Image (cartoon, rainbow, N blue to C red):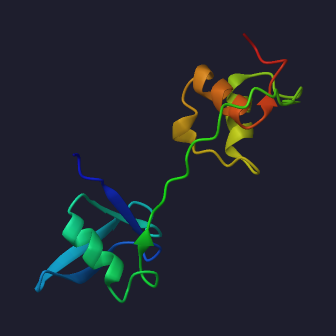
Amino acid sequence: MAKKVKIYRTDRGNLSTCIKVNGNNLRVKFISRDNINGYFSTSDQDLQKAMESDYNYGVKFDEFIQEQPQPYDITPFECVPVITVITWQQAKEYMHTSPYNLPLRSLTSPEKIKSAALSNGVTFPNLEK
């Protein structure tokens, strides 16, 4: 039987804490990429039990439950046409500004710009081909 991997989350960024497992202190490090949410995963059942009975569980960290993906919604949604945009550079700048604020590094080609626009409910009908 495969061991179940559990993921734990903290909203304190990179967090390092000690957990007592079978009488021994074990250092657990939550790693964060955004300095907000840190994550730690383990398949060690003794460590999982120790973490879930630790006094910091539910205070500094808790189990991260990933939401199950919802069934594919086939309901079409309306895209807002932006008729003033006629070049790819304008489209890139449009998606980079508020309210979308997409990073420029994600808008490096016409295909990426078009995909980002569609996923944000925007279309550019007068865009150069």
Position in image of residue 77 (x %, y %)? 83, 31
Q: Quadrant of residue 41?
A: bottom left
Q: Which of 8 and 12 is in front in this view?
A: 8
Image quadrant for the C terminus? top right
Position in image of residue 86 (x %, y %)? 80, 22
In the depicted structure, whether residue 123 falls above or below residue 105: above
Residue with the most extreme bottom position: 55
At x 23%, y 46%, the residue is 2
Q: Which of 40 and 103 is in front in this view?
A: 40
In the depicted structure, whether residue 67 falls above or below residue 76: below
Q: In which quarter of the image is residue 33?
A: bottom left
In the depicted structure, whether residue 123 falls above or below residue 49: above
At x 73%, y 31%, the residue is 73
At x 41%, y 76%, the residue is 61
Q: Which of 35 and 128 is in front in this view?
A: 35
Q: Please tell me how many numbered marks the rendered image carries.
A: 0
Position in image of residue 42 (x %, y %)? 25, 60
Position in image of residue 123 (x %, y %)? 80, 26
Residue with the most extreme left position: 24
Left or right of 101 in this view: 112: left
Residue with the most extreme top position: 129
Left or right of 13 in this view: 113: right
In the depicted structure, whether residue 19 falls above or below residue 39: below
At x 65%, y 35%, the residue is 71
Q: In which quarter of the image is residue 110?
A: top right
Q: Which of 41 and 36 is in front in this view?
A: 41
Left or right of 110 in this view: 31: left
